[in-house]
Amino acid sequence: MAANSSVSTVSAKPGPPLWLLLELTHRCPLHCAFCYNPTDYAHIAAELDTGEWIRVLREARALGAVQLGLSGGEPLARDDLEIIVAEAHGLGFYINLITSGVGLNEMRIRALKTAGLDHIQLSFQDSSQQMNDFLSSTRTFDLKSKVAALIKQYDYPMVLNVVLHRLNIDHVEEILQMALRLGAQYVELANTQYYGWAWHNREQLLPSRAQVERAERTLQAFRETVGDRMRIFFVVPDYFEKRPKPCMNGLGSIFLTIAPDGTALPCHAARMLPGLEFPNVRRASIGQIWFDSPSFNHFRGDAWMKEPCRSCPEKTRDFGGCRCQAYLLTGDAANADPVCDLSPYHHLVTEAVARADRPGPREKPLVFRSDRNSTTLFARQDGT
Amino acid sequence: MSQAAVSAASRPVVDRGFRLQWETAQNAYVLLYPEGMVKLNASAGEILKRCDGENTIADITADLERAFETTALREDVVRFVAMALEKKWLQIRP
């Protein structure tokens, strides 16, 4: 990268969308209050059918996509999941299923294994039945434990994912003990990212700084005890940082998400960004979308950047952070991610953290993800 | 794992946690694993694709020296295999 950072570079033709995430459906048996799906999901048009997903797979693979995430919603809610996996396997994708486990019985896991599924990432919401079931607003803890056993039985690496927030971050020790008991090789402790439902519930979900620091100490001690047996990834809570995350490695650089209705997005939360007309795979090929669509080209390179990012030497490292976070907090997606302490809006983040440091229960109740709440929130944003 | 643990008779094999694959779009071999990918440089790819659990280090070295019409690759192969064992990309077949 050239050193003259004040000159905006005209980027060369982008590389391939190496990472393809298919959000097969917004249907989900869970009702997690920290979900990143859009709060108005109940009003998003019909899901792509099997043939349309298969065309997406073929076109993306031809461009060089190789890591495939199958997500949602709950991807197991699609009864053609096995067909989609078989096609993806035949094309040479490495296939990751990102699931709550609900709907994964022995018949389906056997069929998925035969179809060529490479990996299953299983989510838990907490370490105890009581908290898991409260946070997902379902009775699923025992079922998830059974699914974990099936994953082992079918010789998959055991990868657990737990989203952390104010209501469960104090249970990191118990969560890691549970992961050990289940025989997990990898545990991803992902601090909540505040988009969609999580953004709506931010005041109730954002932990205090003391909670985050305690969790990090617990994690460190646990890592030293457990060593190589179980690897723990900690997705840092960016509100507590001074520099933003290099979100998606820059929009339009390697990630391509296809939403259930076929909308193509450079990041799974990007649908919220105003003024961008995201293309749909029903009307354009993956090649046209990735290389030619104005919305994918918009945030490539650095011509879109404002100060302080534009003249910042760190712009090639973090790309100005997250566009969605910039938009949600400052109203302008081209601003610096306000997590950065060079942003004139950084106080919006520190004020949220200061509010989180106040003890006691939150004033507003949690709003769980559900079709009914989605409809209510949609009506409210519509002004009706 | 030190280099001393790798002998001429060792039979390395790509660990079952990884999948080695040629990617035309990247013009490279890649190692695929849960939600991740390592793009390999040309020599790493050439060594790893020969690590099938049957070939010994001696076989792999000889084959590479033949393919690239060169000699004295043994040390490079051992160094790479030791590094790949450390990263768990490879296992030594017992």
Image: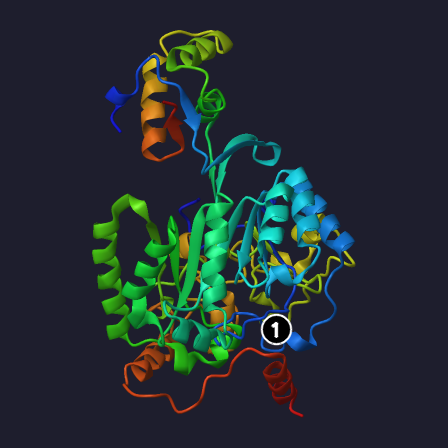
Residue type at numbered disc 1: Pro
In what quadrant of the picture does the C terminus of chain B appear?
A: top left
User: Which residue shows up at 38% across the image and 51% down it?
Assistant: A184
For the rendered model, the colour scheme is rainbow
Residue labelled with disc 1:
A274
Chain to which the residue tagged by mark 1 belongs: A
Residue A28 in percent (x, y) is at 60, 69
- The reply, left or right, for residue A296 in relation to residue B7 is right
Name the residue nearer the viewer: A167 or A6: A167
Answer whether residue A11 is visible to the viewer in this image.
Answer: no
- Give the quarter of the figure containing the N terminus of chain B: top left
Image mark count: 1
- The location of residue A183, given as percent across then percent down, is 37, 51
Residue occupying image coordinates x 67% and y 39%: A91
Q: Is residue A66 left or right of residue B48?
A: right
Looking at the picture, does residue B72 appear above or below residue A46? above
Q: Is A333 or B1 nearer to us in this picture?
A: B1
State the image coordinates of residue A327 (x, y, percent, origin top left).
Answer: 51, 73
B32 is higher (above) or lower (below) than A362: above
- Residue A350: percent from left, percent from top: 32, 77
